Amino acid sequence: MPRWKELKRFCDNDGWELYKTTDHYFYRKILPDGRILRTKVSMGSGEIHTGLWREILKKQLEVTQEYFNEKI
């Protein structure tokens, strides 16, 4: 499973906008069809748990694991 820093690197490399920083990084990406995707990235250094990672890929990033791997 990826680490939080890899998720942040993905967002930075894939054109996501960092729009807020608190105890987390908040990113958004506006898609060509007008939808806005959002994700929150922990500032922690740990690994993202399997179940949470699947949810992030599917519901927040809307990408495959392969696409994610290409961007980090």
Image (cartoon, rainbow, N blue to C red):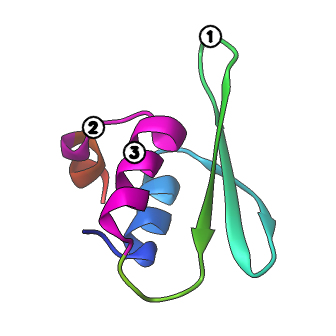
41 relative position to 47: left or right: right
Q: Which residues are magenta?
A: 48-66
Residue at left 30%, top 69%? 2
Q: Amino acid at mark 1?
A: Asp
Q: Amino acid at mark 2?
A: Thr
Q: Farthest bottom residue?
A: 45
| SS under mark 2 | loop
Query: Residue 26 is drawn in which quadrant?
Result: bottom right
Q: CA distance from mark 2 to mark 1?
A: 19 Å
Residue at left 58%, top 67%? 41
Earlier along the polypeptide chain: callout 3 or callout 2?
A: 3
Which part of the image, by quadrant, shows the N terminus? bottom left
Dot 3 surroundings within 10 Å: few (below 14), some, or many (20 or more)? some
* Residue marked by disc 2: 64
24 relative position to 10: left or right: right
Dot 1 surroundings within 10 Å: few (below 14), some, or many (20 or more)? few
Query: Residue 34 is drawn in which quadrant?
Result: top right
Residue 59 image position (x, y, % from top left)? 50, 37
Dot 2 surroundings within 10 Å: few (below 14), some, or many (20 or more)? few
* Residue marked by disc 1: 33
Q: CA distance from mark 1 to mark 3?
A: 19 Å
Residue 52 image position (x, y, % from top left)? 43, 59
- Image marks 3 and 2: residues in contact by CB distance under 8 Å: yes
